[in-house]
Image (cartoon, grey):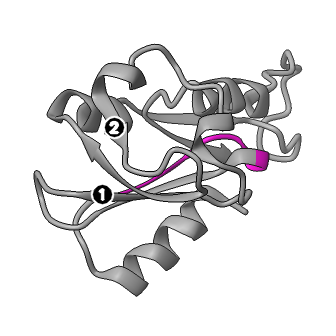
């Protein structure tokens, strides 16, 4: 489940405001804003309840779930929470192909960096393998 493909599918299906796809592969989280400054829907695509997720400390003050015991819930997100979910936008690039980049390089382990950023809901992360 690549986050950018999930994001495109949700945007196409809902036509709503902001859509955030975050979290790790095994606990992908989709947040859909109904209208700017309004209610959101949170879906844990693993099917596990929201209260079983290890949330970053900032979530307690910035996000309130109507149904924390379910995988699908309405959620109220403050403007600070909205900002934290959507910023920064991080692009991690790997210069992997020796035919394009023949000099020796250190392995960057960008997938590990992306997982760490997504696990802490640190903005939007995109991977690029050049």
Can residue 11 be seen by looking at this rendering?
A: yes
The residue that disc 2 covers is 64
The residue that disc 1 covers is 40
In the rendered structure, which segment of residues is drawn in magenta?
Answer: 19-26
Q: Is residue 22 magenta?
A: yes
User: Which secondary structure, mark 1?
Assistant: strand
The CA distance from mark 2 to mark 1 is 10 Å
Residue at 66 percent across and 60 percent down: it is 45
Find residue 115 and report its horizontal and vertical position in percent: 71, 32
Q: Please name whichever residue, 77 or 12, is drawn nearer the observer in this view of the structure.
A: 77
Q: Is residue 103 magenta?
A: no
Q: Quadrant of residue 103?
A: top right
Can residue 130 be seen by looking at this rendering?
A: no
User: Which secondary structure, mark 2?
Assistant: strand
Residue at 72 percent across and 51 percent down: it is 48
Location of residue 111 with respect to 44 vertically, above or below: above
95 lies left or right of 17:
right
Residue at 28 percent across and 81 percent down: it is 15
Q: Please name whichever residue, 31 or 127, is drawn nearer the observer in this view of the structure.
A: 31
């Amino acid at each position: 489940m690549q986050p950018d493909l999930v994001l495109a599918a949700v945007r196409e299906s809902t036509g709503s405001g902001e859509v955030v796809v975050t979290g790790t592969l095994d606990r992908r989280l989709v947040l859909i804003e109904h209208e700017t400054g309004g209610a959101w829907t949170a879906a844990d695509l693993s099917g596990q309840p929201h209260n079983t997720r290890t949330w970053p400390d900032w979530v307690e003050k910035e996000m309130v779930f109507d149904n924390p015991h379910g995988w699908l819930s309405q959620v109220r997100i403050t403007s600070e929470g909205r900002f934290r979910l959507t910023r920064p936008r991080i692009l991690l690039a790997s210069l992997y192909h020796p035919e394009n980049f023949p000099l020796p390089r250190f392995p960057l382990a960008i997938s590990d960096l992306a997982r760490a950023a997504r696990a802490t809901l640190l903005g939007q992360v995109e991977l690029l393998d050049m």
